[in-house]
Amino acid sequence: MTIGTIGYGDVVPVTALGKLIATCTIFAGLVLMALPVGIIATAFAEQIQRRDFIVTWGMISRVPLFAELDATEISDVMELLRAQVVEPGEIIMRAGDTARSMYFIAAGEVDIEIKGKKERIRLGAGQFFGEVALLRRTRRTATVTAITRTSLLGLDAHDLHALMRRDTRIAARIKEVAEHRAGKRAAAVKQEATAIEEE
């Protein structure tokens, strides 16, 4: 009633013309309130979108893998990446899970526990993990847990292959790191097997 500016019933229209005028007044009041509310809501949405864009851009620019990309290329990469924040102690992925994404660390640290090994690996800002299982299309071989509050950029499997086809520099770097990590794991397994045989 307040929005419609028709009062609280102390004065009411009696004639048909008066009721018509009151109806028009109600609709006019609602429209006048709806217009600024819609404008304000749109402005809020734009500000939130702009803030998310700036935050994601900042996260991407801190990852060395993307440091050589120009503004246009970073914008293309941003369309593929999903930003997320995990709290300390939260498990990001478990050994044995199906590999669907790899992750870039924009800020924070994670602990990687490889299945069947006592050794733990700690990764920090600028590094990435989860790419080996994606490239080999196998299940996860490690459990990854956030040590601190960590900002991640997730990249789905099909988007990873699309990004690697699009940018050979990124493809070469990801393959290089994946092969290095796979080689280290194979060497460690061989060393353990040799130690068992010697015993």
Image (spheres, grey):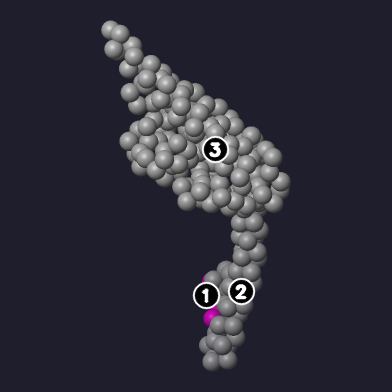
Residue at x 61% of width, y 56% of height: 45
The circle on residue 174 is 3
Q: Identify the residue under disc 1.
A: 9
Query: Quarter of the image containing the N terminus?
Result: bottom right
Q: CA distance from mark 2 to mark 3?
A: 55 Å
- The extreme bottom residue here reads 16
Q: Amino acid at mark 3?
A: Ile
Category of crowding for the residue at label 1, using alpha-carbon neighbours closer than 10 angstroms: few (below 14), some (14–19), many (at least 20): few
* Image location of residue 39, percent across then percent down: 65, 64
Q: Secondary structure at mark 3?
A: helix
* Image location of residue 131, percent across then percent down: 47, 38
* Image location of residue 141, percent across then percent down: 37, 32
Q: Amino acid at mark 2?
A: Val
Q: Earlier in the sequence, mark 3 or mark 1?
A: 1
Q: Secondary structure at mark 2?
A: helix
The circle on residue 31 is 2
Look at the numbered discs 2 and 1 and tell me whether their residues touch, using CB distance below 8 Å: no
Q: Earlier in the sequence, mark 2 or mark 1?
A: 1
Q: Amino acid at mark 1?
A: Gly
Q: Is residue 107 above or below residue 14?
A: above
What's the magenta region? 8-12
Residue at x 54% of width, y 41% of height: 153
Category of crowding for the residue at label 3, using alpha-carbon neighbours closer than 10 angstroms: few (below 14), some (14–19), many (at least 20): many
> Which one is closest to the eye, mark 3 or mark 1?
3
Residue at x 55% of width, y 34% of height: 176
